[in-house]
Image (spheres, grey):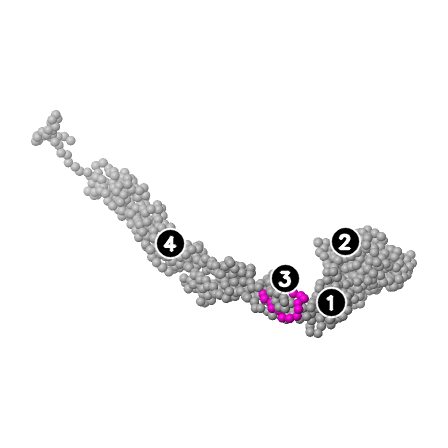
Amino acid sequence: MVKTKFKKAVSLMLAAVMSLTAFTGIGATTAFAAVGEKADVYLVDYPRSGDTNNNGEWGHGNLNYMNGWKGLSTKYTGLRAMGSYSGNIAYCIEPDTGQRTGDTLTEKDENFFNNISPNGTISGDDIRLLIGRILQYGYRGGISTSWKSQNESDANCIAHAYATQILIWETIVGERDAGFNHVSTSGYNAVLECVSTAHPLRSKILSYYNSMVTSVQNHTKVPSFCTRSSGSAKVNELEWNGSKYVATLTDTNGVLGNYNFSANIDGVSFSVSGNKLTVSMEKAPSKEFTITAAKKNGVRRGVVVWSDGIHQNGNGIQDVVTYAQEVSDPVSGFVKMKVSYGSCQIVKTSEDGKVDGIQFTISGNGVNQTVTTANGGKFQLDNLMPGVYTVTEQSIDKYVPQEVHRVTVVAGQVSKVNFNNVLKRGNLQVIKSSEDNLVEGVTFHLYGTSLSGIAVDEYAVTDKNGVASFDDVLISGTTPYTIEEVDTAIRYVVPANQTAPINWKEVTTRNFTNILKKFSVTVTKSDREEGTPQGDATLAGAVYGIYKGETLVDKYVTDKNGQFTTKEYVCDNDWTIREITPSEGYLLDTTVHKVGAEPQLYTVEHNQTANDVTEQVMKGNIAIIKHTDDGETQLETPEAGAEFAVFLKAAGSYESAKASERDYLICDENGYAVTKDLPYGIYTVHQAKSWDGRELLADFDVYIAKDGQTYRYLANNRNFESYIKIVKVDAETGKVIPLAGAGFRL
């Protein structure tokens, strides 16, 4: 049965082809013979058995295309033929719909696409036109089951056919716009992904693919100087070259050779050289005329659709298309030309690009007219009598004054006169000085807005003489520029910005001086424990040195308040204060005190800092061993319980002395007692209590003048001796009774 259908289908296809070859329809009016005939589809999968490239790398997995279309998983590259395995190549237009060899489809003409809904990118009519143009440049031969990819000619056929199929799929799913430009798939698979990177024919397929894309895109591309509508055609000027009127038009689209040219008036000649069209006339035309560019061989392939009547994703039997004879696909472009009898064209250029809105006065031969440039700095005055004209530009402050130009206008020609405005400029010189005479390599920044509105942002660096030059600077406007020193060395006070007006042909001078940051330090010495001096010690008279690195620069002595203030020095990171000689009663402070004179800490010239230093007072104690006799016996008797008051002598008494400057001792059973550590000074030791009948030890002084020293004293008392004088008096009168020899009992 299949074999019978096959024979019938072949005969039907042949009849259709024979009928189509005699048809020359135009555009959408095309009708195809044998519409309604039926034929079977034959599928051929590659690689075929016996193909040396039968490596399983021809297919792809499931793919999700745009607008709901899918690419079903396959191990093969599938191609189709109508009527038989040797019939005309057929191309799928329903990529996700199944199909089997022997499926019968009905022939329809290309008007089939009029009923297809837009695919989200282009209309059904655009799909029809694009498929016809793809087929114009695609593979249109037969198909053979004997094709082998390792054979060059067979490989070319397979690759060309598959490239054609890919482009048709791209058009169907919406990957191509009306200009045949590729659009973004927005996250969906691209149709081209069906060609695996391991596909043995990938490079050939892509080569055909790219070539066909270019051909289809160029199919309706007109020369760049043309428009698709005569009403919107650009007007170009024919100019007199001394012998005829000529215009040369340049095609940047690269399609000039695909077109023939004609004019709607007589006497127009055309010549093409590369991408240039030369239009010439012996006589000037009396009016504007139109040139038509008509594409040579403006045709495409007619499209035959084979369908089961269901054109829907995944439903029915897969629809396919084949090709019919070429049908008309005219493409035209239009451009207009004219000739003026005499024109003067002012062409304005300017350094700042401001070329529109400039006024010029044209005078001569009865003309005295002021015009204003527009459209990129041009103005053309037409219908001028031949002769000499004077063109004067209105003076503008920001530009160097222009000279008057003379121009000769010739009939049939456009005489051009060029004016170029140069912006006025001046110079700025920055003179640098510094306290340490380092002036080379300093960067200055000049910025602001010029009179012309152009931003000025320039830098210059001082030379060995401290001069930074800004040359050819645009003159400033009502607001002068600002000049600033950039990246001022940290040792300097950042100099204030200055204004800098720039005038034409003048040199503006600005002076900048680098002032070194300086410091003085106030050192305050205090007692480490009490803050104020202890004992007889003093904070005055300590000798300190200020050092830079390890070098002693100056010495200073503390006053009565323990302070001194240095003179000014240049800020740096290695300044320190060190004690050389301590004040009376204090230990030497060996600490190296960092001043805090780092220049990054300061912004102005004169800076003050302070260092607080603490000192440790010298301390010692007094130990007493108290005995009760003065040596009249050979044995010493410890005076247990003897009491002593020890106080700073300068205080005057125990009660007046500070708690830290006094102590009260009670001797133990050995007659021994020792004070706490007392600060530097002279202390009075006063016995406050002794045994009955014993003399109190006379006060004595102890000078504590060495740190950590114990001052030891052994003290003895003798027995107390005294005399009694008895005077006899009258008990009533109180008068002395002189009586010798009277006796008394004690």
Q: Position of residue 415 (x, y in %)?
A: 65, 69
User: How far apart in space, not on screen, are marks 4 and 1 (Cα)?
Assistant: 97 Å
Membership of 269 in magenta stretch = no
The quadrant holding residue 235 is bottom right
Q: Nearer the viewer, mark 3 or mark 2?
A: 3
| Amino acid type indicated by mark 2 | Asn
| Amino acid type indicated by mark 3 | Ala
User: How far apart in space, not on screen, are marks 3 and 2 (Cα)?
Assistant: 45 Å
| Amino acid type indicated by mark 1 | Ser
Q: Which residue is mark 2?
A: 119
Q: Which residue is mark 4?
A: 521
Q: Pick the residue in front: 134 or 393.
A: 393
Residue 460 shows in the view: no
| Amino acid type indicated by mark 4 | Val
User: How far apart in space, not on screen, are marks 1 and 2 (Cα)?
Assistant: 50 Å
Residue 374, numbered circle = 3
Sequence-wise, the earlier of marks 1 and 2 is 2
Give the residue furthest to the bottom.
243
Q: Is residue 456 above or below residue 585?
A: below
User: How far apart in space, not on screen, are marks 2 and 4 (Cα)?
Assistant: 85 Å
* Magenta part of the chain: 375-393
Q: Which residue is mark 1?
A: 286
Q: Quadrant of the C terminus?
A: top left
The quadrant holding residue 30 is bottom right
Sequence-wise, the earlier of marks 1 and 3 is 1
Q: Position of residue 558 (x, y in %)?
A: 32, 52
Crowd around label 2: few <14 · some 14–19 · many ≥20 (10 Å):
some
Label 2 residue SS: loop
Sequence-wise, the earlier of marks 3 and 2 is 2
